[in-house]
Image: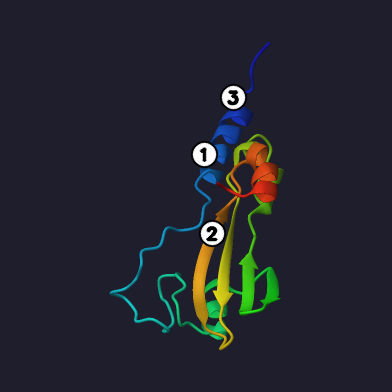
Amino acid sequence: MKTPLLPLATLALLTVSLSQCVAPATNDGSASAPAGSASSDGSIKPGMTKAQVIAVWGEPDEKKQTASGELWRWAQQGWKRHVPVYGTWAKVEEHVVRFGADGKVIGTGTEDYGNAFQEGWRRAYGTN
């Protein structure tokens, strides 16, 4: 029986190209822009306003009011779970921005839920 090389090559190329789909690495940007100014490198810095954050990352998937301000979450990587073969091993992250009572950024973070085998455990019990 002949093995169709084109479908296998296409699958391999798709797997390799999708494995590169991660959030871009950002530097601290301390030399590029002062705190509170709009970021040209895609990073969120303390002191930025909500409008500046939306200009850099777009509208968040979730907004939650907290006692000290507001928490915004970007979780647009769920599509990775639906890619055949690759989806099981894809790393899924959620990006979080915390705002103070004045509406300015006080902190950011990334929650790494790992691959499909790790995700349920990490969502239930944390990443550490």
Q: Is residue 112 above or below residue 14?
A: below
Query: Which residue type carries mark 1?
Result: Val
**Residue 8, quarter of the rendered image:** top right
Q: Residue 17 in the image: x percent, y percent?
A: 52, 44
Q: Identify the residue at image location x=68%, y=68%.
A: 61
Q: Residue 109 in the image: x percent, y percent?
A: 52, 63
SS for callout 3: helix
Residue corresponding to mark 1:
16
Name the residue nearer the viewer: 56 or 114: 114
SS for callout 1: helix
Label pair 3/2, CB-CB below 8 angstroms: no
Circle nearer the viewer, 1 or 3: 1
Residue corresponding to mark 3:
5
SS for callout 2: strand
Instruction: Assess disc 2: are there few (<14), some (14-19) or many (≥20) residues with their C-alpha within 10 Å of its C-alpha.
Output: few
For residue 110, the mark is: 2
Q: Identify the residue at image location x=62%, y=50%.
A: 126
**Residue 67, quarter of the rendered image:** bottom right
Query: Which residue type carries mark 3?
Result: Leu
Quadrant of the frame with the N terminus: top right
The answer for how far apart the CA atoms under marks 3 and 2 are is 39 Å
Query: Of callouts 2 and 1, which one flags the residue occurring earlier in the amino acid sequence?
Result: 1
Name the residue nearer the viewer: 16 or 115: 115
Q: Is residue 10 rendered to the left or right of residue 32?
A: right
The answer for how far apart the CA atoms under marks 1 and 3 are is 16 Å
Instruction: Assess disc 3: are there few (<14), some (14-19) or many (≥20) residues with their C-alpha within 10 Å of its C-alpha.
Output: few
- As drawn, the residue found furthest toward the front would be 67
Q: Is residue 62 rendered to the left or right of residue 12?
A: right
Circle nearer the viewer, 3 or 2: 2
